[in-house]
Image: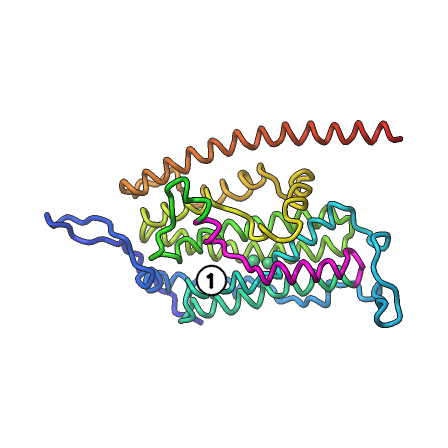
Amino acid sequence: MYRVYCRRRRATLPDRKGTSVARNLTQLELLIELEPIAASNVDRHLSMAKDWHPHDYVPWDQGRNFAAMGGIDWDTGQSALSEVARAAMITNLLTEDNLPSYHREIAENFSQDGAWGTWVGRWTAEENRHGIVMRDYLVVTRGVDPVALENARMIHMTNGYSAMAVVDEKARGADIRPDSGAGLLYSVAYVTFQELATRVSHRNTGRVCDDPIADRMLARIAADENLHMIFYRNLCAAALDLAPDQSMAAINTIVQGFQMPGAGMPGWRRNGVLMAKHGIYDLRQHLEEVLLPVLRKWNIFERNDFGAIGEQAREDLAGFLERLRADVVRFEEQRDRSLARAARRAGQLV
Ligand SMILES: [Fe+2]
Ligand SMILES: [Fe+2]
């Protein structure tokens, strides 16, 4: 167990008049200052995490051979999943499959030392279970085409994914480019939102599968994602206390540049639209179930410890959230019209 101690002190540097002004911390300083918080949260995580085994969540008695071993290959008729459930399952599984990309980013920013290194290893091992169990379930139950799935995995993993590259790209126009000397802050902010987003997506995918076995499996995964989110959220909260302006600027950049980690995978656009249309992960859920609860937990809009940079970032973020609220309404109006059109077409066909 790691020794738990806390020494939260604000990053200050005396100016010429001898008064203290906030200064940016380097990545190394952030890692050292936040290491005790990482240690206590590793302990917390290990005390709360439930050990589980992927094989206990797969209905093996439904399995049979494919043509290469004398059986028959997959066709759509064998799948008990709806088109929406298939799209969501594939998206969520390919997202989990891309773990080496996320590992790279986390390992580079968190370091391999002390509690940080322990967390990177443990988190990676837990995440790997998610891809294992979902693939076993889908192949055994013939829920999706295993050949198309494998081909998509090859493309997606070969391309890799960098959340920071996406954020950097999206933030460029808004003049909120990440501070390259503090990647840790961007990483913890991004993964806090990302873990919560995948939790929501897994949970809702479980519901549309219409299979209690899939629902139980995805609820199990979602519970892991929630614990991961709490680890990162606590780290980011400590970073806000330690370096308020720097952390607020990172949070603002991440929220405005956020994209789901599956962005760019084969079929991303089509599957993403299906998922949004059917309430698995849409803009309102992103705003109300992911962004706002976390921002509330960090007391972003009640804090009084920001300097000029933090205040400016907070104002910028408030404006962005306002625009997002308007986008939510526009999206839902469009979705309602499109679903009504589809219902009318289906009625005419009967
Ligand atoms: Fe996961
Ligand atoms: Fe996770």
Q: Identify the magenta region.
A: 140-168
**The N terminus lies in quadrant:** bottom left
Q: Quadrant of residue 70?
A: bottom right
Q: Is residue 278 magenta?
A: no
At horizontal 74% and vertical 28% (from top left) the residue drawn is: 340
Residues 164 and 45: in front is 164
**The C terminus lies in quadrant:** top right
Q: Quadrant of ligand 1?
A: bottom right
**Local SS, label 1:** helix
Q: Which residue is mark 1?
A: 106
Residues 312 and 149: in front is 149
Q: Position of residue 202 (x, y in %)?
A: 65, 51
Specify few, some or many for label 1: CA neighbours under 10 Å numbering under 14, 14-19, or 20 or more. many
Q: Quadrant of residue 281?
A: top right
Q: Position of residue 207 (x, y in %)?
A: 72, 47
State whether the magenta stretch is mostly helix, strand or loop. helix
Amino acid at pointer 1: Ile
Q: Is residue 4 above or below residue 336?
A: below
At horizontal 28% and vertical 56% (from top left) the residue drawn is: 9
**Relative to 231, 29 lies left or right:** left
